[in-house]
Image: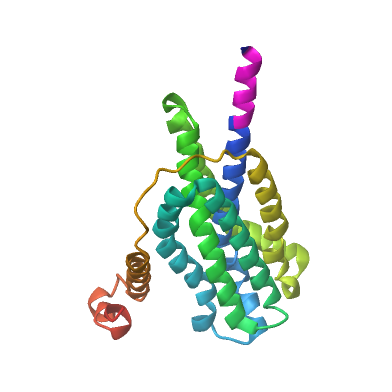
Amino acid sequence: MKQAREQAHAKTRAIMVIYLVGLIIGGLYMGMVSPARTVIQNGFGIDDATGIWMINIYSLFYAALIPIIGKLADRRGRKSIFLICVGIFGVGSFICGISSIIGGFGLLLAGRVVQAAGAGGMIPVANAEIGTTFPPEKRGAALGIAAATTGLANVLGAGVGSAIIGFAGAENWAIMFYLSVPFCLALIVAGAIALPRRAMRASTPMDLAGSALFALFVLLLLIGLKDINFFDFAATASQPAAWAP
């Protein structure tokens, strides 16, 4: 009986660690690019107004896709969607890295969108599964740890990015993206072995058109809000760049 409890606890800890690593990876890249932005945009020969989009585009698509991928995970299975999203994030990271050699800034932005799609699935699925895995009396603490991990990763992202650039050199900024690829591969292997596959209840087909419209709504809303200066609200909110989206 004691051995069975210990095995169950070990399995729960393994599940927790796998999902927490996913939260860390997704959270770090929210802020990791910020300290490298000037270096990257100088390498591509672009100005600040254009370069800031390597950060904005990640945040926009991340926010727009979270509810869609979360719903998809509830229908198709959280384990499979989580592992697929980890793989998508790794592919996005590789695209961002390879943009330093071919494709230029446009390919970097495309890679950031792919990264955002991966993180937009990793984070909500990880939180949902952590809540499902733990019994009610431990669920609050587990979800608190998950929330703290995500917040800490977001805060540490800029510092980690600066450290990588300082160690590798400004001309080797692509390493910052390549580093996540082996972690993603290891996470996929560990998740395929250790994560449970939970049976999903049968449901009606997903409203793909409605989901796409909802994602577009969130994306345009965020684009509009991005251009509003709340210290000069009347002037900036009346600009087409703010109200048109």
Q: How is the image coloured?
A: rainbow
Q: Residue 187 at x, y = what percent?
A: 66, 49
Residue 45: in magenta span: no
User: Extreme right residue here?
Assistant: 168
Q: Is residue 126 visible?
A: yes
- Left or right placement of residue 187 versus residue 210 in this view: right
Looking at this view, is 103 or 157 the one in front? 103
For image coordinates 58% across by 31% down, the residue present is: 12
Closest to the observer: 222 or 48? 222
Q: Is residue 147 visible?
A: no
Image position, residue 23 (x, y; %):
55, 49
Quick one: quadrant of the N terminus? top right
By secondary structure, the bulk of the magenta-drawn segment is best described as helix
Is 120 on the left-hand or right-hand side of 174? left
Which quadrant holds the C terminus? bottom left
Q: How many marks?
A: 0
Q: Is residue 154 left or right of residue 159?
A: left
Q: Residue at x 37, y 74 (%)?
A: 223
Query: What stretch of residues is rendered in magenta?
Result: 2-11
User: Is 10 covered by the magenta stretch?
Assistant: yes
Residue depicted at x 60% and y 82% = 105
Q: Where is residue 171 shown, x and y percent of the image?
A: 74, 75
Q: Which quadrant of the figure has residue 168?
A: bottom right
Query: In the image, residue 158 lies at what x, y percent?
Result: 59, 60
Query: In the rendered view, does 168 fall on the left or right side of 58?
Result: right
Q: Is residue 1 above or below residue 111?
A: above
For this orientation, the residue located farthest to the top is 1
- What residue sits 67% from the left and 78% below the top? 99
- Asked if 132 appears above or below 184 in the picture, the reply is above
